Image (cartoon, helix red, strand yellow):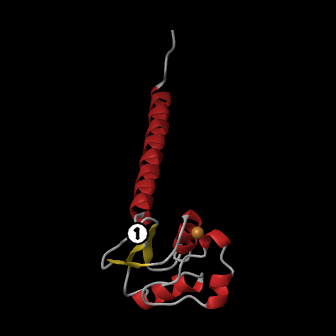
Amino acid sequence: MIIFTQSEIKKSFSINNNIMKKTAILFTVLFALVIISCENTEGFVTEKFTVYGNCGMCKKTIEGSLADVDGISTAEWNMSNDEMTVFFDPKAISLEDIHAKIASVGYDTEEEKAPDEVYEKLHSCCKYERP
Ligand SMILES: [Cu+2]
Protein backbone atom coordinates (compact mmCIF):
# COMPACT_ATOMS: atom_id res chain seq x y z
CA MET A 1 0.00 0.00 0.00
CA ILE A 2 1.28 3.43 -0.85
CA ILE A 3 0.87 6.09 1.76
CA PHE A 4 1.40 9.72 0.83
CA THR A 5 2.21 12.17 3.51
CA GLN A 6 0.27 15.40 3.43
CA SER A 7 3.33 17.36 2.35
CA GLU A 8 3.95 14.93 -0.52
CA ILE A 9 0.40 15.38 -1.73
CA LYS A 10 0.73 19.15 -1.47
CA LYS A 11 3.99 19.01 -3.41
CA SER A 12 2.51 16.95 -6.19
CA PHE A 13 -0.45 19.34 -6.42
CA SER A 14 1.78 22.37 -6.56
CA ILE A 15 3.82 20.79 -9.36
CA ASN A 16 0.64 20.12 -11.30
CA ASN A 17 -0.45 23.64 -10.61
CA ASN A 18 2.86 24.98 -11.89
CA ILE A 19 2.57 22.99 -15.11
CA MET A 20 -0.97 24.27 -15.56
CA LYS A 21 0.17 27.85 -15.01
CA LYS A 22 3.04 27.44 -17.45
CA THR A 23 0.72 25.90 -20.03
CA ALA A 24 -1.76 28.74 -19.57
CA ILE A 25 0.99 31.34 -20.01
CA LEU A 26 2.30 29.53 -23.09
CA PHE A 27 -1.14 29.52 -24.70
CA THR A 28 -1.70 33.17 -23.84
CA VAL A 29 1.62 34.09 -25.48
CA LEU A 30 0.86 31.98 -28.56
CA PHE A 31 -2.58 33.54 -28.87
CA ALA A 32 -1.13 37.04 -28.57
CA LEU A 33 1.44 36.23 -31.28
CA VAL A 34 -1.28 35.02 -33.62
CA ILE A 35 -3.20 38.27 -33.12
CA ILE A 36 -0.09 40.44 -33.57
CA SER A 37 0.95 38.59 -36.73
CA CYS A 38 -2.46 39.25 -38.33
CA GLU A 39 -1.78 42.29 -40.46
CA ASN A 40 -3.78 45.37 -39.68
CA THR A 41 -5.16 46.43 -43.04
CA GLU A 42 -7.28 49.34 -41.87
CA GLY A 43 -7.25 52.10 -44.49
CA PHE A 44 -5.97 49.79 -47.24
CA VAL A 45 -7.51 50.17 -50.70
CA THR A 46 -7.79 47.97 -53.78
CA GLU A 47 -6.69 49.33 -57.16
CA LYS A 48 -7.02 47.56 -60.50
CA PHE A 49 -5.08 48.58 -63.61
CA THR A 50 -3.52 47.10 -66.72
CA VAL A 51 0.02 45.72 -66.79
CA TYR A 52 1.17 44.35 -70.16
CA GLY A 53 2.72 40.89 -70.14
CA ASN A 54 2.60 37.38 -71.59
CA CYS A 55 3.13 34.36 -69.43
CA GLY A 56 3.60 32.79 -66.03
CA MET A 57 7.17 34.00 -65.90
CA CYS A 58 5.92 37.56 -66.45
CA LYS A 59 3.46 37.01 -63.62
CA LYS A 60 6.29 36.03 -61.28
CA THR A 61 8.35 39.07 -62.24
CA ILE A 62 5.43 41.51 -62.08
CA GLU A 63 4.14 40.26 -58.73
CA GLY A 64 7.71 39.89 -57.46
CA SER A 65 8.33 43.60 -58.02
CA LEU A 66 5.75 44.31 -55.30
CA ALA A 67 6.60 41.46 -52.94
CA ASP A 68 7.92 42.52 -49.54
CA VAL A 69 7.19 46.17 -50.27
CA ASP A 70 6.07 48.11 -47.20
CA GLY A 71 2.40 48.99 -47.37
CA ILE A 72 1.49 46.39 -49.97
CA SER A 73 -0.61 43.53 -48.64
CA THR A 74 -1.36 41.62 -51.85
CA ALA A 75 -0.48 42.02 -55.52
CA GLU A 76 -1.89 39.75 -58.20
CA TRP A 77 -1.58 39.88 -61.95
CA ASN A 78 -4.13 38.10 -64.13
CA MET A 79 -2.40 36.56 -67.14
CA SER A 80 -5.59 36.19 -69.19
CA ASN A 81 -6.68 39.84 -69.17
CA ASP A 82 -3.50 41.70 -68.08
CA GLU A 83 -5.30 43.03 -65.04
CA MET A 84 -3.29 43.90 -61.96
CA THR A 85 -4.98 43.99 -58.56
CA VAL A 86 -3.12 45.57 -55.65
CA PHE A 87 -4.34 45.83 -52.07
CA PHE A 88 -2.24 48.47 -50.34
CA ASP A 89 -2.00 51.26 -47.80
CA PRO A 90 -2.04 54.61 -49.65
CA LYS A 91 -0.46 56.25 -46.59
CA ALA A 92 2.60 53.99 -46.96
CA ILE A 93 2.98 53.87 -50.76
CA SER A 94 1.43 55.84 -53.60
CA LEU A 95 -0.21 54.31 -56.65
CA GLU A 96 2.41 56.12 -58.79
CA ASP A 97 5.19 54.36 -56.88
CA ILE A 98 3.48 51.02 -57.46
CA HIS A 99 3.34 51.68 -61.23
CA ALA A 100 7.00 52.73 -61.13
CA LYS A 101 8.06 49.55 -59.32
CA ILE A 102 6.35 47.35 -61.92
CA ALA A 103 7.80 49.36 -64.80
CA SER A 104 11.28 49.12 -63.25
CA VAL A 105 11.32 45.32 -63.82
CA GLY A 106 10.43 45.69 -67.51
CA TYR A 107 6.66 45.81 -67.68
CA ASP A 108 4.61 48.65 -69.10
CA THR A 109 1.60 49.66 -67.07
CA GLU A 110 -1.21 51.87 -68.28
CA GLU A 111 0.50 54.78 -66.47
CA GLU A 112 4.23 54.06 -66.60
CA LYS A 113 6.46 52.85 -69.42
CA ALA A 114 9.27 50.41 -68.61
CA PRO A 115 12.82 51.48 -69.54
CA ASP A 116 13.70 50.08 -73.01
CA GLU A 117 16.95 48.51 -71.78
CA VAL A 118 15.11 46.57 -69.05
CA TYR A 119 12.44 45.45 -71.50
CA GLU A 120 15.15 44.26 -73.91
CA LYS A 121 16.62 42.03 -71.19
CA LEU A 122 13.36 40.15 -70.63
CA HIS A 123 13.30 36.49 -71.64
CA SER A 124 12.31 36.11 -75.30
CA CYS A 125 8.94 34.53 -74.41
CA CYS A 126 8.25 37.44 -72.08
CA LYS A 127 8.74 40.16 -74.72
CA TYR A 128 5.12 41.18 -74.75
CA GLU A 129 3.68 43.45 -77.37
CA ARG A 130 4.18 46.95 -76.03
CA PRO A 131 1.17 49.20 -75.99
CU1 LIG B 1 6.62 36.05 -69.59
Q: Amino acid at mark 1?
A: Asn
Image side of residue 12 versus residue 89, left or right:
right
Q: Residue at x 53, y 68 (%)?
A: 59
Relative to residue 114, is residue 49 depicted above or below? Answer: above
Q: Residue at x 48, y 77 (%)?
A: 52
| Residue corresponding to mark 1 | 81
Mark 1 burial class by Cα count in 10 Å: few <14, some 14-19, many 20+: few
Q: Residue at x 45, y 69 (%)?
A: 77
Residue 115 found in image quarter = bottom right
Q: Residue at x 44, y 76 (%)?
A: 72
Can you tell me which quadrant of the image ligand 1 is in? bottom right
**Image location (x, y in percent) of residue 9:** 46, 28
Q: Answer yes or no: is residue 94 visible.
A: no
Relative to residue 125, is residue 25 depicted above or below? Answer: above
**Front residue of this view, candidates 104 and 10:** 104
Q: Secondary structure at mark 1?
A: loop
Q: How many numbered tags mark residues here?
A: 1
The answer as to whether callout 1 falls within 8 Å of ligand 1 is no
**Image location (x, y in percent) of residue 31:** 40, 55
Relative to residue 81, is residue 105 depicted above or below? Answer: below
**Front residue of this view, candidates 95 and 1:** 95
Q: Answer yes or no: is residue 77 visible.
A: yes
Q: Residue furthest top?
A: 1
**Image location (x, y in percent) of residue 3:** 49, 16
